[in-house]
Image: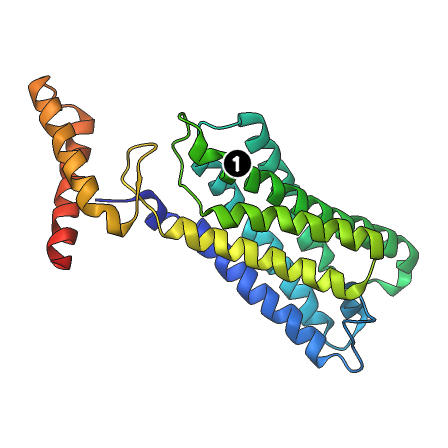
Amino acid sequence: MRYKIGEKMEIYFALFGVLFGGLLIVLAAFFTPGYNPLKNTISSLGNGVAKSLFSIGFVVMGSMSIPFYIQLERELVNIKEFIRRLATGLAILSNLCISLVGIIPDETYIDIFLIFHSFVAYISFVGTSVYIGLYSFLMYIGPKSKLYSGPKFKRYQAYFGFFINGILILLIATNHPLIEWILMIFMWIWGVSTAIQMLSFKFFDIPGIYYRKTQFPEALELFEEALQILDRLDMRDEPITGTLKKNIEYLRNRVKEKS
């Protein structure tokens, strides 16, 4: 018996990437003499003594998050296809730029490098905020749609995503290093909380069916009813019947363990 979310390593990649990468960036700030988040930008860490931590942190975070957002698109099914694909495209582009932010400056071509770094850093912040806003919109309207068959995220997750876009506007208006740090940390928190919520769902190899562990008894009852219907339709040899039987066996064992 297999369940989709449990098998997908993309979610664990994102958790590791954000947590490990974020830790390295914070350590880079801690080990850089005289660094002050009230006065110095995050990018200035790329010129400090801990620039290797800064570089590895961004490369790991950006590269390991890309598979996660591809997986998130697959989960948000039957809802606003254009917005879903746009959000995923922006997520891939933005996280690629996040990886490129980690490139250490080349003093030989410093002017060209600064233009390049400013461009990828801008795309990283703006692009990430925008795709978080788009995904949050899908999370918000998902439970209201009759066709939506993906996981039902907590409502506060969507509100948090909208709030992040407000922080982006504040950053653009003030260009203050502290706001930059706050925005980046909130982005990390949103990514981690999204991944954790996705891990709380079990996917039973049948598109569009999600259950939490607390809903296993309900799932067991529904699956047994579905199996009875297939038996009456003389569909005992169909692949879906075998899938249901495996799910029922799995669910019975889990429910029995709890009782």
Is residue 250 rendered to the left or right of residue 111?
Answer: left
Q: Position of residue 122 (x, y in %)?
A: 78, 49
Q: Position of residue 84 (x, y in %)?
A: 55, 32
Residue 133: name its quadrant. top right
What's the amino acid at mark 1? Leu
Is residue 252 rendered to the left or right of residue 60?
Answer: left
Is 50 above or below relative to 84?
below
Q: Position of residue 27 (x, y in %)?
A: 65, 75
Quadrant where the image shows the C terminus: bottom left
Is 192 above or below relative to 47?
above
Question: Quick one: 233 or 16, which is closer to the camera?
Answer: 233
At horizontal 48% and vertical 42% (from top left) the residue drawn is 72
At horizontal 51% and vertical 50% (from top left) the residue drawn is 156
Residue 236 in view here: no
Question: Quick one: 122 or 209, which is closer to the camera?
Answer: 209
Quadrant where the image shows the N terminus: top left
Q: Position of residue 29 (x, y in %)?
A: 71, 74
Residue 182: name its quadrant. bottom right
* Residue identified by numbered label 1: 138
Question: Quick one: 135 or 120, which is closer to the camera?
Answer: 135
Is residue 171 rendered to the left or right of residue 158?
Answer: right
At horizontal 69% and vertical 70% (from top left) the residue drawn is 52
